[in-house]
Image (tube, rainbow, N blue to C red):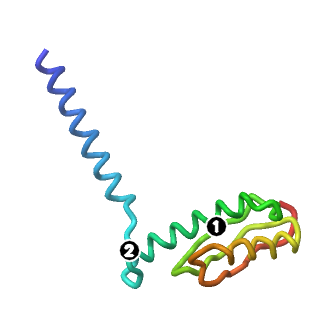
Amino acid sequence: MKTIQLLKTAGSIAIVAFALHANAQTTTQAPASESVGQHIDDGAITTKVKADLLAAKNVKSTHIHVKTHKGVVSLTGSVPSAEDRSAAEEVVQNVKGVASVKNHLKVGAE
């Protein structure tokens, strides 16, 4: 009986240690040239841009990838038309905190 309890306790400790180790590996830190506030702001901008692109009725693509670094938003992926490419850029420019947009969207079949 004591052996089973000992194994349960050891297993619980191993699970906690694994979880702490996994969390330590996945925690991202802002690069030295970027403040923690800027890192958080970039994440918030990226989230807002993605939400606005999905909500935009004049942008017909779910194949747009968004990255933000120091307020500069980079768009990659594909859209079905030049109008969608322009509309996506316009949506992004209207998001608070966006300094500029690098539009690398390709026009073509999705």
Residue at screen point 56% across, 70% down: 45
Amino acid type, mark 1: Val
Nearest the viewer among 102 and 19 is 102
Residue at screen point 28% across, 39% down: 15
The Cα atoms of the two marked residues, 1 and 2, are separated by 20 Å
The residue where tag 2 is placed is 36
Describe the element under mark 1 as helix, strand or loop. Answer: helix
Residue 59 figure quarter: bottom right
Between discs 1 and 2, the one toward the N terminus: 2
| Relative image position of residue 21 (x, y in whole percent) | 29, 52
Q: Is residue 68 above or below residue 18?
A: below
Mark 1: few/some/many CA within 10 Å (<14, 14-19, 20+): many
Is 46 displayed left or right of 56 in the figure?
left
| Relative image position of residue 5 (x, y in whole percent) | 16, 22
Q: Is residue 19 above or below residue 69?
A: above
Q: Name the mark on residue 31.
A: none
Residue at screen point 72% across, 71% down: 91
| Relative image position of residue 2 (x, y in whole percent) | 11, 19
Is 13 displayed left or right of 77 in the figure?
left
Amino acid type, mark 2: Val
Q: Name the mark on residue 49.
A: 1
